[in-house]
Each structure stands twice: as structure tokens, then as C-alpha cells.
Amino acid sequence: MRDSKNRQYTSDWLQHERPQPMYDISINKLYDNLFKENPIYNDNIIEDFKTEFRRFLENHALSKLSGIDMFPHNDICVGCTHFIDDIYQRVGIENVMIFEHDYKYHWRLNPDIKYVTLNTLVPNKELIISMPFPAYGDVHPLMYAILDRCYQLDIPVHLDGAWITCSRDITFNFDHPAIKTFAVSLSKGGMGNDRVAVRFARTKPSGAITIMNDFNMNCKSLMHTGLKFMQELGPEYFWKKYETRYYKVCEDFNLIPTKAIHVAKTQNGSIVGVRPLLRCKL
């Protein structure tokens, strides 16, 4: 069920299909103020955004993210989906491997997708995997075994970090030699209506995102919005605001907490969205 102002604090409002990321009136208030400035007048907005984005990740207090400095080539993109599209375009959809229960966009893009497992990874292809992983609301339990296996087989790994900005208690070192690129988006952190992300790469990739950045084709209004979000609300904003309510929802509806603020697990292990219940007036 989609969120609505008519939401009620009942199990009917748990989102079993397409859980929505957090969003509330504080984001609207941010928009009210930021659109009074014209981003076109900021000639330094690209570097300002990249600098603030790194600081934003490093300032996560509830998670520990390391190894980011080993990826010096930073490009702006329109969310993590743009990052994924760029990989498919560069290497071909038939040369990308995906684990089951990852971002549903992969099978929507390729209905005939054949998922891989740790034991069916093959060389001469590339792997995209979410970190954190949507089906767990946490790092994939086999993540380090997967990375080690990919390194053995010389499989380039690309991490979709869309859920980093809505998660807590994530400890992860990006500096594994199998990882070639990763992207982190502000979308799940609250900027779902203004998708903007940064791709981090060890070496400069080819492809559309690189061309867009080299020729200054990025959208300044998206960078302006993301910059104000990071500066004014800071990392882990919704966890800090809704932590008590989140655990109350889990207790009241017999759910198992995850590390992502907008989802929990049912007792049978299914992911369910809790945003409507977090925003209910009690």
C-alpha cells in the first residue's frame, strides 16, 4: 500500500510491495528555503558537492565506512540507477551478474535474468551487488566470500550503495581489491524526488557518466538540493529522528528490526515497509 495522509496505525498500512523510503515534512521545509537561491550562480557547486559528499559519508556516526579514499575518481550521476545503467551500457546486459533478491530494477530491465550464486560466479563477466542488500536491510551475509571469490576469478565488482544513506550500524571497508566502482545516492536518505549520487572509481571508467562529467553536463539544481540536504540535515537524519518510533513499530507489530529505517522483517523473514506507521500520529 502506498503511503497517504489517511494512514492509520494498523497492520493494514505495512507495505508488503514496494516499501517507500523515508520522507516527511522536514524535507518539504528544506525545499521551501533552498529554492530561494539560484544554483546557477555557484561556479564551484560541482567541487562543493563532491567535497561535502565525502564529508557526509565520513561523518556517519552510526555506521563505519572506510576505504573511500582509495577511489579518487568521483563523478556525479542521477542516483544509483544511473550508475547501474552506465554499467549495463558499457559491458552489455549479458555480461552483468546479479544475485537474487537484489534491486528489483535488474529483473524489470531484464525479465529473463538468470541469477548467480557464490558457486556459479564466472570470469569474463562483471558483478553488481547492493551494499547494504535490500533483502536483508544489511550487508549481504556472504559479501566477503563473494568479494574474495570475485577477486580469485578476476571479476570486477560494482557496489550499489543506495541504501547507505538510510541505514545504520553498517561497518564496511570499500578497499577490497575486487571492488572497482561504487555509488552512493541521497535518494533513500530523503532526496527521492531529486535523485543525485556520486560514483567512486579506482581508475577513470569510460562511458556516459564520465562523458557527462567531463563536459559539465550535470544538473546544477540536483547538486544544489543535495548540498543543502547534507549541510542542513546531515547523515543518518531519519534514524536520529525516528529511532524510538521505529523500534516501537517493530514491537507493536511483531516485526524484526533491520538496519534500514524504512523497512523491517516479518517473522517469516519477508521485508515490509514501515514508513506509513512511522509517520502516523499516535
Image (tube, rainbow, N blue to C red):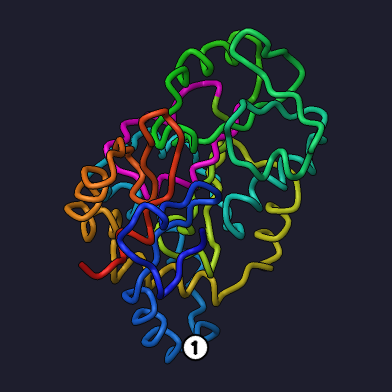
Quarter-wise, where is residue 178 in the image?
top right
Judging depth in this view, the residue of 279 and 120 nearest the camera is 279
Q: Which residue is mark 1?
A: 38
Residue 239 drawn at (x, y percent): 26, 53
83 versus 157 height, above or below: below
At 49% from the left and 46% from the top, the residue drawn is: 16
Judging depth in this view, the residue of 193 and 185 nearest the camera is 193
Residue 47 drawn at (x, y percent): 47, 64
Magenta run includes residue 170:
yes
Is the residue marked by circle 1 packed among few (<14), some (14-19), or many (20+) residues within 10 Å? few
Task: Give the position of the C terminus as an image quadrant.
Answer: bottom left
Magenta run includes residue 232:
no
106 versus 81 height, above or below: above
Q: In the visual, does 122 lie left or right of 235?
A: right
Residue 116 drawn at (x, y percent): 67, 19
Quarter-wise, where is residue 99 in the image?
top right
Judging depth in this view, the residue of 174 and 247 nearest the camera is 247
